Amino acid sequence: MTSRETQGVGDLMEVSPLEFRNALARWASGVTVVTARDGRGPLGMTVSSFASLSLDPPLVLACIARTALSHDGLVGADGFAVHILEHEQREMSERFAQAGAAKFEEFPDERGLFDAPLLPFGVARLQCAHEAAHDGGDHTILVGRVLRAELAGADPLIYCNRGYHGLG
């Protein structure tokens, strides 16, 4: 932190990890699956810490847990795909939230830019070039430049208060 950011903070107590986690559980977010490919094969994980970053140039960010088995492959890939899930894709979210290589077995081997695996379509699918990676505490903030965007008219899958929801 810079001196301005820490000025006056020394006497204040930080929020506990449990309080912080419980507070942020109330934040509703869409659900995405981020995929890429490395020398070992396809990689993918469920990511709810995803956001648009810039319109010009078109940038998005996804926060990848450093403890995730696919962290190094996703962060090190030349590009990746972001699948914004629809409300009917809860099973896909749960599958990609688990560790293991069997995540892709039931899906066709469709590949996008940078050889990134493309999953069945949801609300939107973005194909991105790796723009940057930044330290974000226990996560890496992966920034992608969106090169292709595909859209559908479905309702998104929402995650809030430790559960899945739809808009309706």
Image (tube, helix red, strand yellow):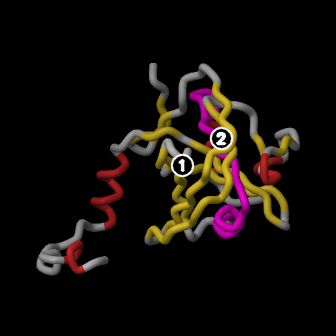
Element carrying mark 2: strand
Q: Mark 1 — residue? A: 60
Circle 2: residue type: Leu
Depth check: give the residue in front, 144 or 153: 144
Circle 1: residue type: Val
Quadrant location of the C terminus?
Answer: top left
The residue located at (57%, 28%) in the rendering is 87
Q: Is residue 95 visible?
A: no
Depth check: give the residue in front, 30 or 3: 3
Query: Is residue 13 rendered magenta in the image?
Result: no
Q: Mark 2 — residue? A: 126
Q: Is residue 1 left or right of residue 102?
A: left
**Total marks placed:** 2
Q: Could you classify mark 1 by the number of other residues whose Cα lies within 10 Å: few (under 14), some (14-19), or many (20 or more)?
A: many
In the displayed structure, 125 sits above or below 4; it is above
Residues tagged 1 and 2 counted as in contact (Cβ below 8 A): yes
Q: Is residue 104 left or right of residue 29?
A: right
Give residue 75's quadrant in the image.
Answer: bottom right
Residue 39 in the image, given as x and y percentages of width and height: 84, 67
Range of magenta residues: 70-89
